[in-house]
Image (cartoon, rainbow, N blue to C red):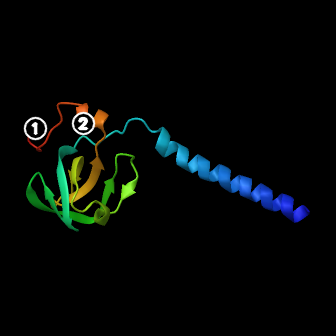
């Protein structure tokens, strides 16, 4: 009987920990983007090759794509999907960070689409 109580306590603790991990991502309402983030359309063709604003580009090694739910997505999972995003470039001009926009984020205007803006 002692083992059953211990096992039950462990299962409750694991369930509680999983719930605590899941809540922050779901509770997040607004994301803060870096000042250098630009808006554009990303189309993953053959990772690391992408089309960014209808121009060929490449994902940087270690590039991160965050979905509208702010969870990381693999580039292979979004092949062929046109995505409206905010993105940053590394010093070599490779796409480093990508955030797929929600409807609320897309409504925020104006947002720069080029570094000159």
Q: Tell me the crowding category of disc 1: few under 14, some 14 to 19, or many 20 or more residues within 10 angstroms, Cα based.
A: few
* 93 shown above or below 36: below
Say which mark, if any, is on residue 117: 1
Q: Residue at x 19, y 44 (%)?
A: 38
Query: Between residues 1 and 27, which one lies in front from this camera angle?
Result: 1
Q: Position of residue 25 (x, y in %)?
A: 47, 45
Residue 71: image location, x then y, percent: 40, 52
Query: Is there CB contact under 8 Å for labels 1 and 2?
Result: no
Which residue is drawn at the image coordinates 86% and 65% (left, top)? 3
* Residue for point 54% across, 43% down: 23
What is the number of the mark on residue 14? Answer: none
Q: Is residue 106 shown left or right of residue 26? A: left
Residue 106 disc label: 2
Work out whether mark 1 precedes mark 2 in sequence or the reverse, and give the earlier one: 2
- Classify mark 1: helix, strand or loop: loop
- Quick check: 112 above or below 71? above
Q: Nearer the viewer, mark 1 or mark 2?
A: 2
Dot 2: few (<14), some (14–19), or many (≥20) neighbours within 10 Å? Answer: some
| Quadrant including the N terminus | bottom right
Task: Work out whether residue 59 or residue 5 is closer to the camera in this orientation and state it.
Answer: 5
**For residue 74, what is the image quadrant?**
bottom left
Residue at image coords 28%, 59%: 78
Rendered location of residue 20, percent (x, y): 59, 47
- Which image quarter holds the C terminus? top left
Q: In the picture provided, is 116 more to the left or to the right than 95?
A: left
Q: Secondary structure at mark 2?
A: helix
């Amino acid at each position: 009987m002692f083992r059953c109580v211990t096992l039950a306590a462990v299962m409750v603790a694991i369930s509680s920990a999983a719930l605590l991990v899941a809540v922050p991502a779901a509770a997040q309402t607004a994301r803060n983007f870096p000042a250098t983030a630009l808006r554009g359309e990303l189309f993953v063709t053959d990772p690391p090759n992408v089309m960014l604003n209808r121009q060929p580009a490449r994902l940087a090694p270690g590039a991160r794509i965050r979905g509208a739910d702010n969870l990381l997505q693999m580039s292979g999972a979004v092949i062929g999907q046109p995505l409206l995003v905010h993105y940053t470039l590394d010093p070599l001009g490779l796409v480093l960070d990508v955030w797929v926009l929600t409807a609320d984020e897309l409504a925020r205007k104006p947002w720069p689409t080029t570094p000159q803006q």
